């Protein structure tokens, strides 16, 4: 069974860096043709795609967040990470990691999600 688990600080000060990790079990992050994504949902708003890293290590970013976002991976830990810097209170959200099946696997869609982690940006 595939499981994703987010980890990281729940409170970050403005102008500092947010760093989250997603540890995956049951599916290697190098398996063709999955993308490993970060999605967030601010309070009272809809979900927003932040970015992703694919099975080859290529990265993809939301253009609105690209200048502040970096996604990387550690294949030895089967883990991928999100760094967002500098943060503002508008970055307060529940952050989710998720696995995206690409069309190369027959159908496209998110099939596994982490439970989400609340991140609050406040001084």
Image (tube, helix red, strand yellow):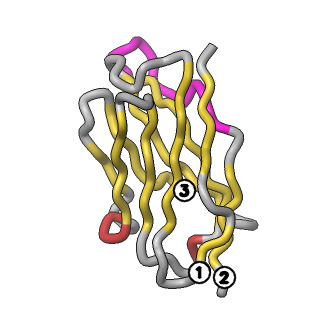
Q: Is residue 14 visible?
A: yes
Give me the C-alpha separation between circle 1 and circle 2. Answer: 5 Å
Mark 3 burial class by Cα count in 10 Å: few <14, some 14-19, many 20+: some
For the question of whether residue 46 can be seen, the reply is no
Which portion, as a residue range, is magenta?
103-114
Residue beneath disc 2:
122
Among numbered discs 1 and 3, the one appearing first in the sequence: 1
Q: Residue furthest right?
A: 44
Question: Judging from the image, what secondary structure is the residue with disc 2 in?
Answer: loop
- Alpha carbons under labels 3 and 2: distance apart: 20 Å
Callouts 3 and 2 close, C-beta under 8 Å: no
Foreground tag (1 vs 3): 1
- Whether 104 is among the magenta residues is yes
Q: Position of residue 104 (x, y in %)?
A: 33, 17
> Which residue has dot 1 on it?
13
Residue 111 belongs to magenta span: yes
SS at circle 1: loop
Residue corresponding to mark 3: 48
Whichever of labels 1 and 2 marks the residue nearer the N terminus, that label is 1
Q: Is residue 29 left or right of residue 57?
A: right
- Give the residue at x 44% y 29%: 78
Relative to 95, does residue 15 appear above or below in the rendering?
below
| Residue 86 to residue 52: above or below | below
**In this orientation, which residue lies closer to the viewer: 15 or 110?**
15
């Amino acid at each position: 069974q595939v499981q994703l688990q987010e980890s990281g600080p729940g409170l970050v000060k403005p102008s500092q860096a947010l760093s989250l990790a997603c540890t995956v079990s049951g599916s290697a992050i190098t398996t063709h043709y999955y993308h490993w994504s970060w999605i967030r949902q601010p309070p009272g708003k809809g979900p927003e795609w932040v970015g992703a890293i694919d099975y080859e290590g290529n990265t993809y970013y939301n253009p609105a967040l690209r200048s502040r976002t970096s996604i990387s991976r550690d294949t030895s830990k089967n883990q991928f990470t999100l760094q967002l810097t500098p943060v503002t209170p508008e970055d307060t959200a529940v952050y989710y990691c998720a696995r995206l099946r690409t069309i190369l696997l027959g159908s496209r869609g998110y099939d596994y999600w982490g439970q989400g982690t609340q991140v609050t940006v406040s001084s």
